[in-house]
Image (cartoon, rainbow, N blue to C red):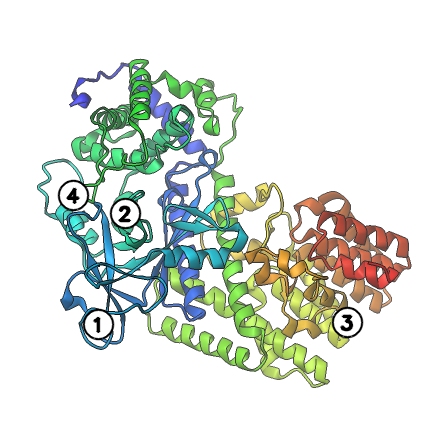
Amino acid sequence: MLQAMFRIPPFFPSLSVLLCRRLDAVGANTLVFDRRREAFLHREAMDTIRRQAKGLNCVCFHFGSQSEGTTTPGLRSDTDTLISMNDFNIMLHWSDWKRGMINFLMVKDESTPAQHYHLQRVRSDEPLPVTRVVTHYDVIDSHGRVFFSNLSVIRVSAQVFGADHLRRGPSNSNDEDLDYVYALPCTSLPAEILAWFDAMRPGYWPPPEMFDIARQCPCFLVADGDRGSPTEDIEWRITPNLIERHLMLSLNIVQKKCLIVLKMLKKQELTPHLHEDCKFTSFHCKTALFFTLERTPSHVWREQGLLECIVRCLHTIREFLIQGECPHYIVENVDLFDKKLCRECQVKLEKQIRVMIQDDMHVLFNLHIDDIGERLMQLNPRIERFPDQTASVCGELTLNMFNVYVMHSSFICKHLCDTRDTGLQGAIDLINTLTFRQANDTLSRYESNSAQFLITNLLSSLASVVSSYCIQTGQAVPREVWQMYSETLDTDVASSRLKLASMLYCRGDLHRSAFVLNDMQQRLDNSVTSVCGCRRPPNEQPSEAFCEFALRHGNPETLTRKMAFCVRFTREEMYCAPAILWFEMYRSVGDDVAYRTPIQRDWMDWAEVDARPFMLYLQYLTFGGLCDRQRQLQALQGLWNICTITLGKMYHPETVANLLGHCLEVEGHIEGALGLYNASRDDMPRNNAANLHILRLTGLQ
């Protein structure tokens, strides 16, 4: 083996320790690894609950670098989500058949590419093959067998994501940073996977107990045929993602750092040498790490041995490149270079890696990613040119997690609360279901936290919907609704309080509205960060104070104290919102709706506004109604400062500009208001209520 021939330079141990410290400083440390795992397990729990609330029988999993913790800010890793569609019974044997289910039998023969299967339709009333086409995605072969085409996933995804649909292998998305893979769970482990468990393993890793847990992990079939195969459209690829995640989460910190450095080298030193249609991926690096772990004693995987471990992995990659084949670590008879990396590029990469090793890994001093090279050359600990990024990484992880939380809970609330009759009952049913599951311990810790977050937000929306109806019809708000407001004030630091203050203002209860606004303003210090589930401002960076708070606290309930969610009003809540926000609910003019993205279609019929400017706008209205001119002008000045200084860092900036424009209208500055509405329209020409305001003031299009 090549690994047996390499030498260890005398400076490797000390440089390894220094490299470990520098990786710690860019967020590749135990604290961040744990936070990443927690954040993504919470995210997948909320994603699952959201989809199940919409009636889908599925479970979501996050895979890849983000959830495994093997990334840094400079690597800019995307987020991989696998959605297990559980309405299907994927049979490996006829004994796996289930009555009443949509059954498919996994079929393959000598001509079927490795790691792939065909899915033959089987009847739901008895275990017999289907003999005629059921859907237009079915294909009949020469033997009369009916197979389910993988084009079903591709075409349905294209409808969901619309014109922005992106397809990369089995993944579908409308965002370069997000990959969604729709998968079918296998009832049993196929022979290709069982062979991994049954193989004799004289190596150092994995330990036997790891296999016992891995055997319980299901495998999935994904819509990804073998490129160029004559039956590509009806081939489904087997993938052991959960087994791989189990292996990755068992790694120690040095093993994870080793993989991170391999990814950095891949991105900067290897990828530029490839042809446009060739790929050397992070999965190749992960595979090399797994094989290297097998043949490397555990005592080598320590801080002083990091460089030795990196070189061992590079030798493993060289072996693959020299032999022209990269075996899958778990699935037998699969070459990961096949149709990914041509022979010419394999030779180029082998040469590059050989040069790196022969040069005693001096390439590390040239790594630009996360400034690792410069960090390594900065030997004087008293001069810190590059700050520790642990706090900022924790802050961004927290912010991203709550962005997902708010997005999912908002869409569920909209789905259930948009119609006053059936929607309200649906929301109540979901609250009761989640509460029952919490009480009976049928939810994991992550699911329970997500469920509680969702319950609180649903109750807040229910209170607002009922209050809106009461204000519209002139009825008193029931005591139970006031109780709901009281119980849901702590969804975050701002949004529920602002909805209460807005409802009080719309009822004419200005003194109580002012009291709530004053209380909320005292809570909005510089450690509070804004969160939105549907949009992101440019160059989003949480404040240093928030990041420090996120560094010290990892509990989601504690972190909500520093979150200011955007304030959302559905059309069913419109009488709890100031009248100017009604225009936001009907913002489209002409054919604007046709130009909405799939995500915009989910929220643009709401009024949605950043919490801080909405607080100032409500203060302006409330103090004006109370004839407190001084405080009214203070609120106006604060809103003006936001629009002139920090508007670009706000969520929904066009709505903020429209609110300020309305304030100028109230002040009698019609030209100034028109100027703001025009500026808002110039920034966002379509699907912007500014168009309606301009028409309202001028009578012109």
Residue kind at label 4, given as amino acid type: Pro
Residue kind at label 2, given as amino acid type: Pro
Q: Which residue is mark 2?
A: 230
Q: Secondary structure at mark 3?
A: helix
Q: Is residue 420 above or below residue 565?
A: below
Residues at marks 4 and 2, CA–CA distance in whole angstroms: 41 Å
Q: Which residue is mark 1?
A: 98
Q: Residues within 10 Å of mark 3 (few under 14, many from 20)?
A: many
> Considering the image in quadrants, where does the C terminus appear?
bottom right
Whole-percent x, y for residue 193 in the image: 18, 49
Q: Secondary structure at mark 1?
A: loop
Q: Secondary structure at mark 2?
A: loop
Tell which tag, 4 or 1, sits nearer the viewer: 1
Residues at marks 4 and 1, CA–CA distance in whole angstroms: 36 Å
The disc, 2 or 1, on the residue closer to the chain's N-terminal end is: 1
Give the numbered dot on residue 300.
none
The disc, 4 or 3, on the residue closer to the chain's N-terminal end is: 4
The disc, 1 or 3, on the residue closer to the chain's N-terminal end is: 1
The disc, 4 or 2, on the residue closer to the chain's N-terminal end is: 4
Residue at point 37% right, 29% down?
266
Q: Are marks 2 and 1 in contact (CB under 8 Å)?
A: no
Q: Which residue is mark 3?
A: 510
Residues at marks 2 and 3, CA–CA distance in whole angstroms: 72 Å
Whole-percent x, y for residue 314 in the image: 28, 25
Q: Which residue is mark 4?
A: 207
Whole-percent x, y for residue 458 in the image: 53, 71
Residue 50 shown left or right of residue 492 in the figure = left
Residue 227 in sight = yes
